[in-house]
Image (spheres, grey):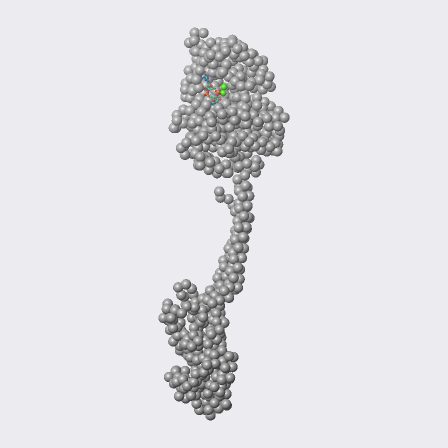
Amino acid sequence: MKHKRSKLEKWIDAVYLLAAIFSIVFLMASVVFMAYSERLNKEEKSDYIVQTAKQSAQAVNRHIQDNFHTLESLGVLVEYSGGSDVESMERILLSLMESYGFVRIGFSDLNGNASWLEADGAARIDVDLAQTEFIIRALAGENVVTNTRTDPASGVSINYYAVPLRENGEIVGLVFAADATSDLLEILNVSLLGGKGFSHVIDQSGDFVVRSDSTLQDTGAQGIFDLDEQMRENTRQQILDGMAAGKAGFIERNTETEKRLASYAPVGINDWYVFYSLPESMIDESFHYMSNGLVSLVTVSILIFIALTSFMRIINEKSRQSLESIVYKDMLTGHRNFQKFLIDARTVLNERGSRGYSLWYCDIKNFKYINDMFGYDVGDNVLKYWADTISEDLRAGEMFGRVDADNFVCLRFFDGEQEARERFVEEAARLESFAETAKRGFRIEMCTGVYVLQEEEGLTVNDMLDRANVAQKSVKALNGSRMAFYSKAMRENILRETEIELKMWQALEGREFLVYMQPKIDIRHDNKLMGMEALVRWNSKEKGLIPPSEFIPLFEKNGFIVELDRYVFEQSCKLFHDYVLESDYPPLIISVNVSRLGILQPDFVESYVAIKDMYGIPDGYIEVEFTESIAFDNHVMFSGIVKALQSHGISCSLDDFGAGHSSLNILKDLTVDVLKLDQLFFRPGLDKNRDRELVKSVVSMAKALNMKTVAEGVENFKTVDFLRRIGCDIVQGYVFAKPMPIDELLYYVKNYDNKMEEDADGG
Ligand code: C2E
Ligand code: CA
Ligand code: CA
């Protein structure tokens, strides 16, 4: 259902929006920050790894330079001592070997004749090493360190170090030593993180000089490019170019399984480089604090956001529920209101189909009276009591709701009319005994209409409730608690009534309402024609002549009767004016009917008198007929009106006397001029004797009260005789004439012969 948005809902929307904006801004900031820190991170990583390579390179360089210094010092010593033979130097050489970890140490002359001492003290003298590369290079004046090689004697990896031996600036030979590569490896391995990285000393072509421990298996690779055959050409070239330029560098590459970061830095000796490589994940671990911090920050904010939005959702749901209870609950009874009933009934009927259901429309008949008599509090309590009563009587799957005021609707199972009536009677009995009114001797009456649902009828719940309501209205006017089942005829009646209501005004303007006149005969004065009653007919363009019984009750309900009665009254006055005053027709008393609603109009007397005067009708020729029930409803007011009319020369007649709850006692207080005995008394087949006695006593009583008596609906002369005998004055009935249109009436009046009918009857 659509409803106006409440303040609370708007507020909630605003907070939602704020939360959403905050979250978006926050997430964007986080992304930017992460990207930024990622970049920082990357820079930091490359810095870190290049620095590591450089440090390793320096350490390698230092180690090599240390060895060179050691050998240079040895050279100085040799020069100083004047001898270069191994035997004379044995003690010094052994102590150097021990303290530096050399595998062998010795000298060579300019011709490459070398003599040395092994670590175990064994001496080799005059071995020709003239063709050995490091010998050649050292004799050429260079400090040399060789690539790693496996020492055939000890089986360990070694590097030869050699420095030239000079005397007075002239190269006279060289000093050399073999150092176990493990020393260099120790230096390189310092920077290896948990063994997942490796650190090599390589030459400018990428071949290994010192190969890191961590590449455990010897795969026969000669250099870093052999180790990683998938390394892309441009990466390889980048490394080679960088090394050729003598620079340190950083590379990033993806292998099949991981991303690796590598760096290289010149050792500063030979064309050596330290090449340092490790998986990025290793490095990330050392950066994990920052990223973890960021991740937890984002996580926490997401959690806060989730908490906030679910909190909002809860609030929203709560407010929706409370809104729903405002929108869907009937405030007075606390049960469903009509909206909710419609929604729920639709749902139930859609789910289960309409077979076996009925819709009830209930109305408390005298509810307005309860409010007026006992006050609104009692009225409210009646409604609550009734709501609770129905509610308690509901079975699972049934429901009810309040439409408005004292109108309730129910969806109930239907098990035949008998069962429905029993339920209704029981509920109505409970309502009738409602304590607050029962103790004052007042009975609450209920009327209910039921529509039994038909399968496949395609009616909406609203349509069906309308039908239940039609049924309800059909019994509303009856006494006591009532229940009615909707029938097609009821609906047709409603349709007919609606159609009439749509057309009545037009009909009045279009002069479709005709005034018929029924003559009245004075049976005590030679059956003289003394007057007539105006009776309305509807000559409908579409339907022809419609009798008053088909529209008067409806007009009495919808109030149109007030207009119609005045119209008939005016037409009657006009008739008198046109044919009696303006022409030579004999003056006849014309009586017109006035409905209950007519005399309740504040200007009733005034307007009727005005019309009478307008047509210049002399006093005593116009009579109004009121039905008996109006007079007895409120006889004080009625007497006032009667007196007022009489004072303006309008006579009053009490119509249909004896039909309803006539009370002969009141009759003497009603100063009407004429008493019309109801047709009921003269209908054939009734208890003649009893009726005759009654008619006789009414007529004599009227006489005593100085009223004229009219017998209506008399159809035979036997009755006329009887009426004449008991002193009844006037007869209006088919025995003399039926109601007739004006032209017929004029003819009838012109040709009326007082004695005619009775002669014909032979009486
Ligand atoms: P009512 O005022 O009691 O009128 C008498 C009814 O009895 C008329 O019926 C009349 O035609 C009928 N009637 C007269 N003599 C006989 C007879 O011998 N046998 C039979 N069977 N019927 C006879 P009508 O004209 O159908 O009117 C019916 C009712 O409609 C009237 O009853 C009156 O209550 C109401 N009505 C008619 N015209 C008007 C009107 O202009 N205003 C108001 N408020 N009510 C009117
Ligand atoms: Ca009448
Ligand atoms: Ca009558």
- Looking at the image, the residue that sits furthest to the front is 122
Instruction: In the rendered view, tell whether residue 360 sits above or below residue 84.
Output: above
- Looking at the image, the residue that sits furthest to the right is 439
Residue at the spot 44% in from the left edge and 24% down from the top edge: 550
Q: Quadrant of the C terminus?
A: top left
Residue at the spot 41% in from the left edge and 74% down from the top edge: 208
Instruction: In the rendered view, tell whether residue 94 sits above or below residue 433.
Output: below
485 and 72: which is toward the camera = 72
Where is residue 644 drawn, in percent x and y? 57, 24
Where is residue 154 drawn, in percent x and y? 44, 76
Residue 202 shows in this picture: no
Where is residue 414 drawn, in percent x and y? 47, 28
Residue 547 shows in this picture: yes
Seen in the image, is 362 located left or right of residue 230? right
505 and 642: which is toward the camera = 505
- Looking at the image, the residue that sits furthest to the bottom is 168
